[in-house]
Amino acid sequence: MQDLGVTVAPEGAPMYQQIFDQIASRIRSGAFPEGYRLPPTRALAAELGTHRNTVVRAYAELEAAGFLTSTVGRGTFVKAWRGSEPPLAASAPPERALPWASLVSSAVRSEPIRRFLRYRRDPAPREVIDLTKMQPPDELLPLELYRRCLEHALKAHPDKALGYAPRDGFRSLRARIVEDLARRGVPAPADDVIVTTGSQQGLDLVARALLDPGDVVLTHAATYAGALQVFAASRAHIVGLPSDADGPDLDALRRLGARRPKLLYLMPNHANPTGACIGRARRAAILAWARDAEVAVIEDDYAADLELEEAPVPPALRALDPDVIHVGTFSKRLIPALRIGYVVAPAALKPHLVALKHTTDLGCSATQQLALGEFLDRGYLVAHLNRIQPAYRARRDALCDALRAHLPSEVRWQRPTRGLSVWLALPDGTDPERVFDEARRRGVLVAPGHHYAADDATHPGVRLNFCWEPEERLREGAARVAAAIAATLGRDRSGPVLDMV
Ligand SMILES: Cc1ncc(COP(=O)(O)O)c(C=O)c1O
């Protein structure tokens, strides 16, 4: 018998799948070309020391998948396979390239988008302590629970799971999202909810639905870089709001009213990057101003459920005013790879958002929506939160205790009660980019405040995330960041410089 080179391990995937995978991979690589005749099932089974039915099943599945064809009395053969043909030769480069720099739109040339390209960095080696990642670490992802829901979605709804989903998302998922919002005191009828590709798409849809070039958008002075990029892509004029301890300054809002702003973008519970929270009375006052000035309000609740203390959360803006556009996500509290977020939109706005979403992606993944719906239905989210909240609390404490021990006294910061980050406000005139460089030389990555600046008036700072790294590395990272800041401020307590990145 010809040697197929197939081996099977007693542990791991079922034997018929191992045979399937190895034969399929040889067909893909061209080792088994079109017309190649596979050995009879009995012979291969004897060679592998397995039951003949196992090989019969592997062949049957390879045939069903389109790799093989079998003819009674003749045998089993590899079907025509185009995967291994050499790629077409690239055409010769033109003498003169198109003038792309002048062809790109003014949106692409806007500062927040150029900034994104300027500060793009290569991935850091693992030994570098990364305080920039705002996503759950592998060990806090609910891999097993999610796998079960994914399998259930594919088994229970094979037709729906692999087709296009409704434009605004499956009703079943929207109903689960409504229950989840109600748990957190955010009122929303399912008809007002649109499932989006992450909350990033939610922000983009709202911006495209409301903004014309030159429209004024008000944001926190230091705000989420992805939102700045979205507003810049709509060619809006972005103005940063000064704040006090309770939130955006009301006098500044009233003054800016004269510029007829269209949109106010806020993260009331834990602003990214500063961690600022808007007080209850200030929320009501801001909404009263916005209604009076006819300004649309976006409430971005990206840090929902990332509570680190028992303290009550102030009411959502959406709970105070049904015209507020509420944007949320499952990325930070659950799994970023779902790419599932949502917008709760006033009824008059929703059809426009749905139409714009259709222009972008024809809907979110049906498979992921059904799996997430099942995850929420089974109560796995709340169980998962019970697991991650204490872990994030311990990480926050590790970082904050070490910052308290090491940071120079001029740096102002607060221990956050929710969210995943700590903002270090640097003395005026400090260049956060220098802190970034100094920190990088010491083997730790921080996010410099330039990324988040709405305009030139924004105060300098750096953001440290505590979700990604384990406690020991957070302690070490804090000490290195403190040394980097001291060095930038001209007070060298730098310790060893590692030059790791
Ligand atoms: C404040 C804020 N809003 C929205 C997003 C978008 O996240 P996603 O598209 O994964 O929901 C992020 C991501 O970091 C964020 O920080």
Image (cartoon, grey):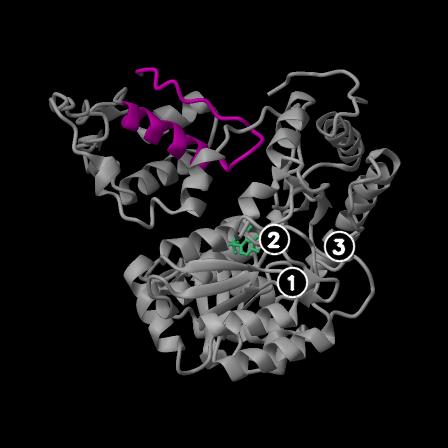
Marks 1 and 2: CB-CB under 8 Å?
yes
The residue at the far right in this view is 405
Residue at which label 1 appears: 304
Residue 87 or 395: which is nearer the viewer? 395
Which residue is drawn at the image coordinates 79% and 51% (left, top)? 414
User: Dot 3: what SS?
Assistant: helix
Residue 433 or 181: which is nearer the viewer? 433
5 inside magenta stretch: yes
Q: CA distance from mark 1 to mark 2?
A: 8 Å
Q: Position of residue 69 (x, y in %)?
A: 21, 37
- Amino acid type assigned to the residue bearing label 2 in the image: Lys
How many labels sit on residues? Answer: 3
Residue at which label 3 appears: 389
Residue 92 in the figure: left or right of residue 162: left
Q: Is mark 2 within 8 Å of ligand 1?
A: yes
Residue 445 in the figure: left or right of residue 59: right
Residue 135 in the figure: left or right of residue 363: right
Residue 387 or 403: which is nearer the viewer? 403
Q: Position of residue 428 (x, y in %)?
A: 69, 42
Q: Is residue 80 above or below residue 292?
A: above
Ligand 1's quadrant is: bottom right
Mark 3 or mark 2, earlier in chain: 2
Tag of residue 332? 2
Q: Is residue 365 above or below residue 70?
A: below
Q: Position of residue 480 (x, y in %)?
A: 75, 27
